Amino acid sequence: MWLGNRNWATPLSFKKAACALLVAGMGFLAPSGAYAHAVLLNASPANDTVVEAAPANVQLRFSEPVSVVRASIKIGEGTSIDLPATSGSEVDLAIPQSISNGTAIVSYRVVSEDGHPVGGSIVFHVGAPSAISAPAVADTSVLLQGAIWSIHTVSILYLAVLIGGTLFTRWLYPTMSLIRRPDLVIVLGVLLFSSGVYLQGLDEMGLGLAFAGLEPLLVASRSGAAIAAGMASVAVLLVSIPVCRASPAYLPLAVLAMGAASASFAFTGHCNVVATPWLARACIVLHGATLLFWIGSLPPLWRLSRTGPTDPLAGFSRVIPLPFFVLLTAGAALAWLELPGVQTIPLSLYGRLLVLKVALVGILCVLAIYNRFWLTRPAAAGDQTARRKLRRSIVAEVALAVAIVATASLWRFAGPDQLQYAAGPQAFSIHLHSGEVMAQLKLVPDLAAGTAKAEVDFLTPDFDPIDPQGATLRAWNPDAGVEPIKYDLKKSSKGGWEASGLPTFDPTGWKVDIEVLIDDFTMKHLEGELRP
């Protein structure tokens, strides 16, 4: 990739010009909006409810704004009908007036601001249930997820080596060789970034790892991933522009490229869904810029520690503390902004990945301190033993850099915004009582299934536990036209009684009736209204 002196005053060839135009064109992709890691909170009609007549629309309420990729409804064994939909945190799906009675399956595929697609189905019954096949589930191909992770990791490392390395050489070692084949660098960048956009489109469409024509690109062009790919491509173009070392634009072009590359990180990811997105975006830009510079500096530093001059080594040792401090501070600020609380860290993939990344960065800090205070000065003085140790230490830093980027890339599949639901489900409790028996009913939302679980403890009026022979729960919503749904309560392994599959995310308007068989001759009813 690198070459010695070269005459960069010659005009660009036709191939180079074509590559430049292609990259510039990608920069003008204009998405209609950005997307994020969303959680379905509730639906109306709720899952597995019976309604007297077909509703005019189905409402889906998510934890944050989403954009609908597709939505459809299927009645019984009939054909699927595409549904017009709105976007936002509350999505309205317009239902055709001509649908017949029976079991309706409403399937949806949405994408939110970090580019993570979410798919699912809501089942309700018009009049009465009908025989149906199992609803189709969107493909969550492991191969596709692996490809997305791999391309994302390689893309960041590519930007780091190219953009960060160029900034290092133009700033601290201007006499070092320049990019040998700018046309090849541009083509590789375009292929890499466009592949990431294509895979994003496949994921948004719910497809596996397969070729699906141009449609995935068109679908993903509406997301922040397209802007990020365009800006990354522009960054590659800026460092590939042939400019002589004496030109005033020699260093500024590298700085502009670093700005474009680091700013591309702000258009995807979890920084878009926090309470103060502008602060999170500023942190991710600073974090990304210092990360790219640090990783990109490692290959030229390794070469310099072998046979090169000592000035760049000493110069890097002087300047790196400030960028490294910015890297750590911005990363800590991002974690503080995105995590609901320290107690949620072990409860999710996001938190566990954060712990792993912090551990890797901690090892990196130890290496950086060792390099700066024990190896750099003797290596710069010509000590060959120190130079050999420094080269080995830099190789270790490269391995850590790859591990840190690979770990951070897994965050694409783990949203910090979901921790607040995983850490503390929004449970709802109600106390029901009669003259002889009382019941404490607790409804715990099951976010994965889109329903809730009922947990019931039976007590005497003196608050002593009762072990009835059987119990049944009925739930209905007269305001929404939902007829009573019957659930047989079963003994729980934790003690008490439970039932799953209740459509009660939002308890407003719902009524319940618990029928308790205390003994062979005594049956009691406990009735009440769920009030949030």
Image (cartoon, rainbow, N blue to C red):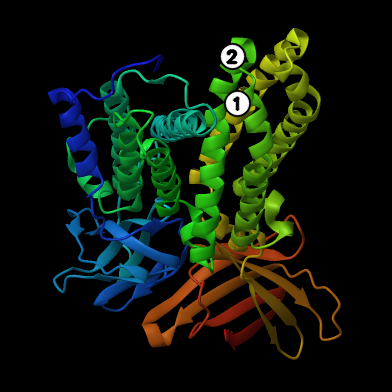
Q: Nearer the viewer, residue 34 or 307?
A: 307
Q: Is residue 294 left or right of residue 423?
A: left
Do we see residue 129 in this rendering?
A: yes
Residue 338 placed where, x, y %? 59, 59
Report the amino acid beneath label 1.
Pro
Residue 308, labelled with which disc? 2
Q: Quadrant of the N terminus?
A: top left
Residue 471, labelled with which disc? none
Report the amino acid beneath label 2.
Gly
Q: Is residue 428 above or below residue 452?
A: below
**Furthest residue toward front:** 246
| Residue visible at 28% across and 46% down in the picture | 205
Q: Residues within 10 Å of mark 1 (few under 14, many from 20)?
A: many
Q: Residues within 10 Å of mark 2 (few under 14, many from 20)?
A: some
| Residue visible at 51% across and 44% down in the picture | 289
Q: Is residue 163 above or below residue 66?
A: above
Q: Is residue 54 above or below residue 531?
A: above
Residue 501 placed where, x, y %? 51, 62
| Residue visible at 28% across and 23% down in the picture | 8
Q: Do the numbered discs 2 and 1 sit on residues whose CB atoms are within 8 Å? A: yes
Q: Badge 1 is on which residue?
A: 312
| Residue visible at 22% across and 42% down in the picture | 24
* Mark 1 secondary-structure assignment: helix
Q: Nearer the viewer, residue 512 or 414?
A: 414
